[in-house]
Structure formats: C-alpha cells, structure tokens
Amino acid sequence: MLVTGKQVLDQANKGNYAVGAFNVNNMEILQAVVAAAEELRAPVMVQTSEGAIKYAGIDYLSAMVRLAANKATVPVVLHLDHGTTYETIIGCIRNGWTSVMFDGSHLPLEENIRQTNEIIKIAHACGVSVEAELGRLGGIEDNISVDEKDARFTSPDEAVQFVKETGVDSLAIAIGTAHGKYKGEPKLDFDRLQTIKGLLPDTPIVLHGASGVPEDSIAKATKMGVNKINIDTDVRVAFTEGVKSVVTTSDEFDPRKICGPARDAMKKVVMSKIQLFGSANKA
C-alpha cells in the first residue's frame, strides 16, 4: 500500500525503530526492496534520487513504484532523495511521490528555513510529507558532491530553530556519516545525536550515508532515536557482485539470468538492514 513518509516515520518514532530507505534506479532493485519488506512484514521507503529520475525517467519510476506499492501488503513510501530544485520536487509531487526531501543544507540557515517553508506549503497542500537537512555530509552520491572540508555537523540549537520555524516532518542530521564508500571506519557523534533527539523528541531523525557504517553503530543510533536510515551503496555493491558472479564464470548472455542473481543478492542485503533497523514485523 502506498503511504506517506509521515505515516511510517511518526509510527517509527513512537515505536523506537528505524524504517529503511533504499535508493532504486531500475526494476530489479525495486523488486528486491519490496520483496524483502514483504517477507519481513516491514514498512519501507523507496527512494529516487535526481540521478535516478534522469536515468530512468520520472514517469517510468512513478509507474513502477506505484504499481509495486499498490500490490504490496506492507506500507511503501515513494520518496524523493536530495531534491535540490523546485522543478524536480514539484514534478515528483505531480507524479505521485508521497514524500520529498528538500536539500537546502548548502544554504545559510535562514535561507534554508525560508526555502524549506516554501516546499512544505506546496507539499502539505498535496498531502505529501517533507524531509529537510541541516548540516552537510561529505562524499558523493549521484549529483550531490561535498568535499570533506565543506562537511559540517548539525548544531543542536540550529536544529531546534529549524524545526520550530518550519514544522518539517523529518530532519536529516549530520553526525559523522558520509555518502558513498568509506575510506575508513566512520565514527558517529552519539552525544550530538542524543542532544538533538532530546531537544526534538517528536521529530523523526534521518541518517544519511549509512552504507558501510558498523552494525553496532547503526543499532545504537536507532535506539537513540534515528527513525529513517538511508541505504544506497550497499545495495549497489550487492547488485554488482551478483552480476559478476554470473558474467565472470560463464558465457551467459540472457539479461534475466544475469540480473536475477543480482536481484537475489540485493534482497538479502535489504533484509539484513531491515532486521538491523528493528522494523521487521512493524507493518
């Protein structure tokens, strides 16, 4: 069933677990994500980046995800990840997305607040949830690239001001994660997370760049109040390894027999994340 981000994240906040948000670019990734959620009876967020929309087309992604969601017996959210332009965000709202992220993290605080409020006014009028970001993650994800020197952690005081002045449905914070593959082991600032969640107990907190973060750190972050966890790189790696397992060991040329094992590999990864996040049997 297709639902909004607010519906699943408010419930996760009350239940003290996190909902997995997985980026999709094609049919096989989508099928793997939804099948994993169905098997574990978990709510799930299907994310599309601006890069995915450019690759697959907004109408194709909308049709695929909405079909999968309407056939599913668990809650499925169609979410825009890192929306940076009004054109993309409005286009997604018009095409059936039930949740959008406006990424104004590169803006000064007051301008981020102003632009976020403009998006919220439009989205909420259409019954669409809004996620925003405060602080900046380093690394690269599709068309989002932030040098390490430009990354900054989220200020607790600014987080309170931001939520108070916008009423945003969920807030992505920067506490030490990064987009893409890590060169070393990330160290999360749990004290900062605890402070922010303590100040904003009713606001679902989002953790971006969670691929490659040690499982114990993810489990701790979830217990401390993170309610949405973004996964992209780990799924991509599973897809690539699944394809390699076929093309490097045989002369197979049937796309179904190449992509099938990749889909199975991705499903296993998604299932492991859902269990780690504590959202299994929460549908």
Image (cartoon, rainbow, N blue to C red):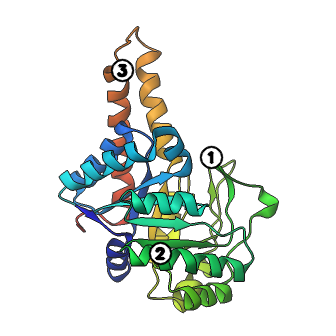
The amino acid type of the residue labelled 2 equals Ile
Q: Nearer the viewer, mark 2 or mark 1?
A: 2
Disc sitting over residue 255 in the figure: 3
On screen, residue 252 above or below 23: above
| Circles 2, 1 touching at the beta carbon (< 8 Å) | no
Depth-wise, is mark 3 or mark 1 nearer the camera?
3
Q: Please, what secondary structure does the residue beneath circle 2 have?
A: helix
Q: CA distance from mark 2 to mark 1?
A: 35 Å
Compare residues 267 and 128 and report the one nearer the observer.
128
- On the image, the x and y values in percent for residue 282 come to 25, 68
Give me the disc on residue 181: 1
Q: Is residue 243 above or below residue 169?
A: above
Q: Is residue 272 among the parts visible in the rendering?
A: yes
The residue at which mark 2 appears reads as 122
Camera-nearest residue between 129 and 58: 58
Residue 256's quadrant in the figure? top left
User: Looking at the image, which residue is at 51% across and 39% down?
Assistant: 55
Residue flagged by tag 1: what amino acid is it?
Answer: Lys
Expressed as whole percent of the image width and height from the top left, the position of residue 46 reads 38, 55
Q: Amino acid at mark 3?
A: Pro
Query: Where residue 237 sits in the image (x, y, percent)?
Result: 50, 38
